[in-house]
Image (cartoon, rainbow, N blue to C red):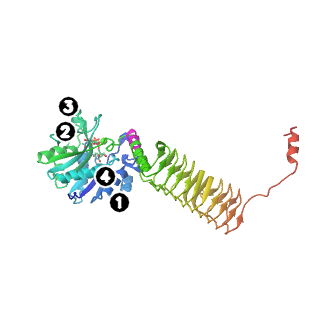
């Protein structure tokens, strides 16, 4: 059967006071991405006609991460029904046959589940809407789904539920799918005559039944529809997602020696035969090519690692790090906005920032790119095959041309021509017998 074409409206106007944070709730990161991005990514996979995001005032950051999708403003927060009214008034339907309503704070929702809801609506022409439900032993706080003779009769919110209804364990996840040609009339019938004096989206079920439509449910697991209202729930979602990401990585052939100690991001990508040792943190936007080996206790963010390169142990790769093939970044090396050519090495104790390192270059232990003068950042260019001796300060802007050699302990402030030696080093003094005489002053021998 032809599936319905549809648009998506993501509700994200809530401030999330229980997060106890100045950040809007949907901006809190989960596996390296803001909550709202997880929801948008799931929606995007299904290529809807349009995705729009309903935000509250002072949520410019939410609008920015929601791009290219449009955002609509809900000034007064009068309930989920009011939210969808505002969305529809702002053009959220976009002339699609159906509207999927998602919550910005329910990030683990999968495209498959949304697809199952769409399939159910398209197979049941008499249905006005589909509600996503889940079973839980602890239903307190959720709207309860009252199902009779296999059909959804109504949703009772916690505050209005009778003692008998409170015992229902089939709950509303909040995610709903509406047939577009019915939705406006259902929204028009909503009122706020209830305990919370809010316009409840859940009252659309009652109005749809009264108008002669049926209402259906699709069931998800409680994990998938976990809503984030507090830091505790955020941590719970992180735990669930990390387990999923590790399982996917293992399935893809990544070796995780102690999986539960490796933190991954939703957008981490792996080539074949990648090995990740214990206690590694991989933040957003990290890409590991074939045969990459990340050694223990390394921290990576915004880094692209070329084939067969090794990183760590105890390395820190910051945003803008790009490693070619067979690169070696060893212990206590920090990189930032740094490109390393094939076979380049920085094996120990270095800071390489705002730099380009050529193929086969060797950066000795203790090399520092002095990229900051307190006001501005400057670039260091290290050519192909350059050898930088240990404990060297490279004061940027500076260029070491191809094949140059820098003597250990130098502070390099001028460009070094190709194939030259450069070093800054006071001449070494030797005073024969001085040490013996010195000890004699203290009446000591070795
Ligand atoms: C809602 C449902 C409840 C369901 C629960 C699942 C209603 C009336 N109740 O209750 O049946 O079990 O979700 O978590 O729908 N929002 C706006 N603007 C508003 C109000 C809400 O954008 O004016 C957004 C919030 O940011 C949030 C979502 O809608 O993402 C849900 O709102 P919330 O107030 O948390 O609803 P609940 O009372 O939890
Ligand atoms: Ca909620």
Which tag is nearer the camera, tag 4 or tag 2? 4
- Kindly check if marks 4 and 2 are in contact, taking CB atoms under 8 A apart as contact: no
Is 23 left, or right, of 213 in this rendering? right
Q: CA distance from mark 1 to mark 4?
A: 19 Å
Helix, strand, or loop for circle 3?
helix
Q: Which residue is mark 3?
A: 164
Q: Which residue is mark 1?
A: 68
Q: Is residue 158 visible?
A: yes
**Based on the displayed image, in which of its 4 quarters is residue 153 positioned?**
top left
Which tag is nearer the camera, tag 2 or tag 1? 2
Q: Quadrant of the N terminus?
A: bottom left
Which tag is nearer the camera, tag 3 or tag 4? 4
Helix, strand, or loop for circle 2?
strand
The answer to which of marks 4 and 2 sits earlier in the sequence is 4
**Relative image position of residue 408 (x, y in whole percent):** 71, 57
- Residue 234: in magenta span: yes
Q: Quadrant of the C terminus?
A: top right
In the rendering, which numbered label is found on residue 146? 2
Q: CA distance from mark 2 to mark 3?
A: 11 Å
**Based on the displayed image, in which of its 4 quarters is residue 149 positioned?**
top left
Which tag is nearer the camera, tag 1 or tag 4? 4
**Relative image position of residue 143 (x, y in whole percent):** 24, 39
Helix, strand, or loop for circle 4?
helix
Specify the segment rendered in magenta: 231-238
Q: Which residue is mark 4?
A: 111
In this picture, is 278 found above or below 360? above
Q: CA distance from mark 1 to mark 3?
A: 46 Å
Residue neighbourhood size for the residue with mark 2, other residues' Cα within 10 Å, grouped as few (<14), some (14–19), many (≥20) = some
């Amino acid at each position: 059967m032809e599936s319905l074409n549809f648009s998506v409206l993501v509700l994200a106007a809530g401030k999330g006071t229980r997060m106890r944070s100045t950040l809007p709730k949907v901006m809190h990161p989960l596996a390296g991405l803001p909550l709202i991005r997880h929801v948008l990514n799931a929606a995007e996979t299904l290529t809807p006609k349009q995705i729009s995001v309903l935000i509250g005032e002072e949520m410019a950051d939410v609008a920015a991460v929601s791009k290219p999708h449009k955002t609509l403003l809900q000034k007064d927060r009068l309930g989920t029904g009011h939210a969808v009214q505002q969305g529809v008034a702002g053009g959220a339907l976009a002339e699609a046959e159906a509207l999927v309503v998602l919550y910005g704070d329910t990030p683990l929702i999968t495209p498959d589940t949304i697809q199952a809801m769409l399939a159910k609506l398209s197979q049941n022409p008499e249905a006005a809407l589909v509600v996503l439900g889940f079973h839980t032993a602890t239903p307190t706080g959720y709207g309860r789904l009252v199902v009779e003779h296999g059909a959804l009769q109504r949703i009772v919110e916690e505050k209005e539920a009778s003692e008998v209804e409170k015992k229902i364990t089939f709950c509303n996840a909040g995610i709903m799918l509406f047939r577009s040609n019915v939705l406006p009339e259902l929204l028009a019938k909503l009122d706020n005559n209830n305990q919370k004096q809010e316009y409840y989206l859940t009252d659309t079920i009652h109005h749809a039944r009264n108008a002669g439509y049926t209402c259906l449910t699709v069931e998800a697991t409680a994990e998938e529809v976990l809503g984030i209202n507090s830091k505790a729930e955020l941590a719970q979602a992180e735990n669930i997602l990390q387990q999923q990401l590790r399982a996917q990585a293992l399935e893809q052939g990544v070796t995780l020696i102690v999986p539960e100690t490796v933190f991954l991001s939703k957008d981490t990508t792996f080539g074949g035969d990648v090995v990740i040792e214990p206690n590694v943190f991989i933040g957003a936007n990290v890409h590991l090519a074939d045969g990459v080996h990340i050694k223990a206790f390394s921290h990576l963010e915004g880094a692209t690692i070329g084939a067969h390169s090794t990183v760590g142990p105890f390395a820190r790769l910051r945003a803008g790090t790009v490693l070619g093939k067979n690169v070696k970044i060893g212990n206590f090396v920090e990189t930032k906005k740094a490109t390393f050519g094939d076979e380049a090495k920085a094996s120990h104790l270095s800071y390489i920032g705002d730099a380009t390192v050529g193929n086969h270059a060797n950066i000795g232990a203790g090399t520092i790119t002095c990229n900051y003068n307190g006001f501005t950042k400057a670039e260091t260019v290290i050519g192909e095959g350059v050898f930088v001796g240990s404990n060297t300060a490279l004061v940027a802007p500076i260029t070491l041309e191809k094949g140059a050699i820098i003597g250990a302990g130098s502070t390099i402030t001028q460009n070094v021509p190709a194939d030259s030696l450069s070093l800054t080093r006071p001449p070494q003094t030797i005073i024969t017998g001085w040490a013996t005489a010195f000890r004699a002053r203290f009446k000591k021998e070795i």
